[in-house]
């Protein structure tokens, strides 16, 4: 889990748009860190929805970052092509 979460700040800084959804952020975070993502998912062996649990944890960590501010919520497609609500974030100016 630490390997994945330690990349939050780097991923925030690399987001192409100043505003982005949690879904967009998760895709950017895990895209180049597939092994770390699988390892993090394995920390939820008894959870019936490990992806949801991990994605909620990532959202919580994102909310604690000083690099972003949550500006709302929206519906968008998650990585399973299902519409669901997620946070919308704005990267703070440096």
Image: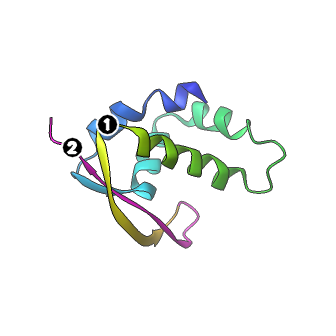
Decide which of tag 2 and tag 1 comes sooner along the chain.
1
Identify the residue at image location x=80%, y=56%: 48
Q: Is residue 78 above or below residue 62?
A: below
Identify the residue at image location x=68%, y=41%: 41
Q: Quadrant of the C terminus?
A: top left
Pointer 2 with pointer 1, Cβ within 8 A: yes
Left or right: where 28 falls relative to 41: left
Q: Nearer the viewer, residue 31 or 86?
A: 86
Whole-percent x, y for residue 78 in the image = 52, 64
Identify the residue at image location x=60%, y=31%: 35
Name, please, the residue furthest toward the left: 94
Magenta-span inclusion, residue 83? yes
Mark 2: few/some/many CA within 10 Å (<14, 14-19, 20+): few
Query: Circle 1 sits on which residue?
Result: 66
Mark 1: few/some/many CA within 10 Å (<14, 14-19, 20+): few
Query: Circle 2 sits on which residue?
Result: 92
Q: Is residue 73 above or below residue 10?
A: below
Q: Quadrant of the N terminus?
A: top right
Q: CA distance from mark 2 to mark 1?
A: 8 Å
Whole-percent x, y for residue 74 in the image = 40, 71
Magenta-span inclusion, residue 12? no
Identify the residue at image location x=48%, y=40%: 61
Q: Secondary structure at mark 2?
A: loop
Q: Nearer the viewer, residue 42 or 35?
A: 42
Bounds of the magenta span? 79-94
Left or right: where 43 falls relative to 59: right
């Amino acid at each position: 889990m630490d390997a994945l979460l330690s990349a939050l700040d780097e991923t925030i800084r690399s987001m192409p748009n100043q505003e982005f959804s949690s879904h967009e952020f998760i895709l950017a975070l895990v895209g180049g860190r597939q092994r770390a993502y699988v390892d993090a998912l394995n920390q939820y062996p008894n959870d019936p929805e490990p992806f949801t649990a991990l994605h909620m944890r990532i959202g919580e960590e994102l909310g604690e970052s000083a690099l972003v501010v949550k500006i709302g919520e929206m519906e968008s497609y998650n990585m399973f092509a299902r519409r669901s609500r997620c946070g919308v974030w704005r990267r703070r100016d440096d």
